[in-house]
Structure formats: structure tokens, C-alpha cells
Image: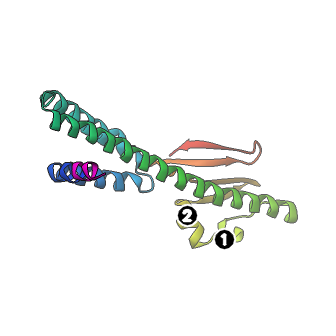
Amino acid sequence: MGILVNFIVSFANRNKLFLVYIIVITWWCSLRCMAWMLAMLLPIVIIYQLGKLGIFWKDILKRKDRFVAFAVIVVSLLVVVASHTYQHWEARSAANKIVADIITFNKTNGRYPVDDKELGITDLTRKQLYRVNYKAFDGKPSFSYAVTYVLFRKWEYDFFGGTWNVEYG
């Protein structure tokens, strides 16, 4: 156990900038609608680590550092995926509840709500779903909310098919 702790402490001392970079990327990419940044940042980090691995292949300590760095990158990626999976489940749960309210409103009143105010969408719901949009045109409802992992996409509910579809825009 002591050897492992010593290795981790020495790795952290030798790779402070890398660890700070990974922590910042992980935090930033875990924010709502920011997972797409992984596609831009992760290849740079991996190419850099592969280059370092090639340069330091004969030095066992530095080679170990590069393998540990790859492990840190994988853990970072898993944290971002877990974060966005949780955000998606939370948002979808709230959205399904709103869709059920819209359907219930339709069954009791014989029409769909005119706007989100009549539906009773609160500020808390807006915070949970980010970019909630509800409208009714000619008696046809339209409900959507932002995709949690990428910008400029939204989940739109098809009331007649009973499914969620990704829309661009």
C-alpha cells in the first residue's frame, strides 16, 4: 500500500500541469451541453501522451507515468460520460412528467394547453431542462428541451407517435 501511495504522490508531483489540465477539461466537459468539447480536446491530449510515450519508452519510470496518464484520461472520460448520463436521465424524467401533464390536460379539457404558462412550467423546470419550449399550433402540441450533452440540438416529443426525436436547431 505504501508503495502505491508513494507512486501516486510522485506521479502527481511530476505531472502537475497534466493533472490540472485534465481536471479542468473534465469539469468543463461535464457541464451541460459541453460534452462535444471532448471531441476537440481529447485527441490533443492522447496524441501528446503517445508522443511522450514514444520519447520515453526506455525510461521505465517515465513509461509508467505515461500509462498512468492514459488511465487518468480514461477515468476523466468515464466521469464526463457518467455526468451527462445522469443529466440526461434527470432531464428526461422531468420532460416525461411534463408530457404526461400535457396529455392529461388534453384528456380533461379536450384541447392542448395554449402555452407553457397555462401548462404551469416553473423556473425550476426550466433550470432542470434548459431551453424548454412548448407551443400549440392549430391544436397540435410541440414540446422540446435541449439535449444535455451538445449545443444546438433538442429532444422533441412526438405526441402522435409517443417517441422522443433529436432535432437540430
On the image, the x and y values in percent for residue 26 come to: 35, 52
Q: Which badge, 1 or 2, comes first in the chain's sequence?
A: 1
Amino acid identity at mark 2? Gln
Amino acid identity at mark 1? Lys
Q: Residues within 10 Å of mark 2 (few under 14, many from 20)?
A: some
Q: Residue at x 22, y 31 (%)?
A: 50
Q: Residue at x 47, y 53 (%)?
A: 83
Q: Main secondary structure of the magenta part?
A: helix
Classify residue 141 by image quadrant.
Answer: bottom right
Residue 53 in the image: above or below residue 131 = above
Question: Is residue 11 found left or right of 86 in the rendered image?
Answer: left
Classify residue 78 by image quadrant.
Answer: top left
Q: Which residue is mark 2?
A: 128
Q: Residue furthest front?
A: 2
Question: Is residue 128 found left or right of 104 in the rendered image?
Answer: left
Residue 127 in the image: above or below residue 169 = below
Residue 1 showing in the rendered view: yes
Instruction: Give how far apart the Cα atoms at labels 1 and 2 are.
Output: 17 Å
Say which element carries label 2.
helix
Residue 23 in the image: above or below residue 70 = below
On the image, the x and y values in percent for residue 19 come to: 24, 51
Please name whichever residue, 44 or 161, is drawn nearer the observer in this view of the structure: 44
The residues colored magenta run 1-7
Residue 117: mark: 1
Q: Residue at x 40, y 51 (%)?
A: 34
Comparing labels 1 and 2, the label whose residue is closer to the camera? 2
Say which element carries label 1.
helix
On the image, the x and y values in percent for residue 18 come to: 21, 48
